[in-house]
Image (tube, rainbow, N blue to C red):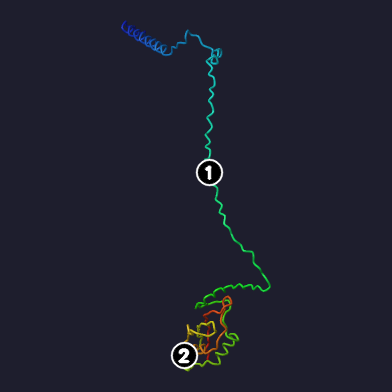
Amino acid sequence: MEPKKTPKADLNQKTGLHLAIGLVVSLALVTLAFEWKDYDGNSLVDLGQVEDSFEDVMEIPPTEQPPPPPPKIQQPEIIEVPDEEEIEEEIEIDLDVEITEDTEIEEMVFEEAPEEETTDEIFMVVEDQPEPKGGLSAFYDYVSKNMKYPSQARRMGIEGKVFVQFVVNTDGSLTDVQAIKGIGAGCDAEAIRVVKSHPKWQPGKQRGKPVRVRMVIPITFKLG
């Protein structure tokens, strides 16, 4: 058995239906108002058939600008220079000279070049080294014959080399004799004495001229 509908319930159902229909119609009108477009009588224009009238517009003639004027060429200023004055000098040349067989011609005298000043410079190495007459072998023969072994060095059994330094002068004489490295016990003094007593050497030469040369020679002391 179905329940009976009351008149109040039927009225509420119809009222809700009317509100829904009104809302849908309102939304449709609003949407149509925003989407509506005016196309000038609803006629579309075919852009492909539009005549191009841009060429009929006023033609602008090309403007021709005159070329710029050429730059002014500044002519160089010409300055007149006075002619150089010619100086005329009369040179008198006496060519009227009589030459006979008896005419004597004076000899031309040339002044001799001044001699180079010799200095007291002492060389260590020169082109031609000084040497004793007969060579170094003759020098050592002289030393061995004239040297006396010092008694103190003999008693102490001292042996060794004494290095003697000296200067060979331009005349070959030996000066500034000294022992620069010795062994003592009288050997240094004996080596100096023997070198001083040696005859003159042949002097050293530089560029062909005798010069002073410093030399060092070892003298050996050996018992035996």
Residue drawn where x is 52% and y is 76% of the image: 117
Q: Residues within 10 Å of mark 2 (few under 14, many from 20)?
A: some
SS for callout 2: loop
Hey, which residue is sitting farthest right in the picture?
101
Please report contact status of discs 1 and 2: CB closer than 8 Å, yes or no. no
Q: Position of residue 169 (x, y in %)?
A: 52, 82
Q: Is residue 105 left or right of residue 124?
A: right
Q: Which mark is residue 61?
A: none
Residues 153 and 186: in front is: 186
Residues 66 and 140: in front is: 66
Residues 120 and 7: in front is: 120
Residue 55 in the image: above or below residue 100: above
Q: Which residue is mark 1?
A: 80
Q: Is residue 16 left or right of residue 108?
A: left
Q: Position of residue 150 (x, y in %)?
A: 48, 92
Q: Quadrant of the N terminus?
A: top left
Residue type, mark 2 in image: Gly
Residue type, mark 1 in image: Glu
Q: Which residue is mark 2?
A: 186
Residues 2 and 192: in front is: 192
Q: Quadrant of the C terminus?
A: bottom right
Q: Position of residue 12 (x, y in %)?
A: 32, 8
Residue 144 in the image: above or below residue 168: below
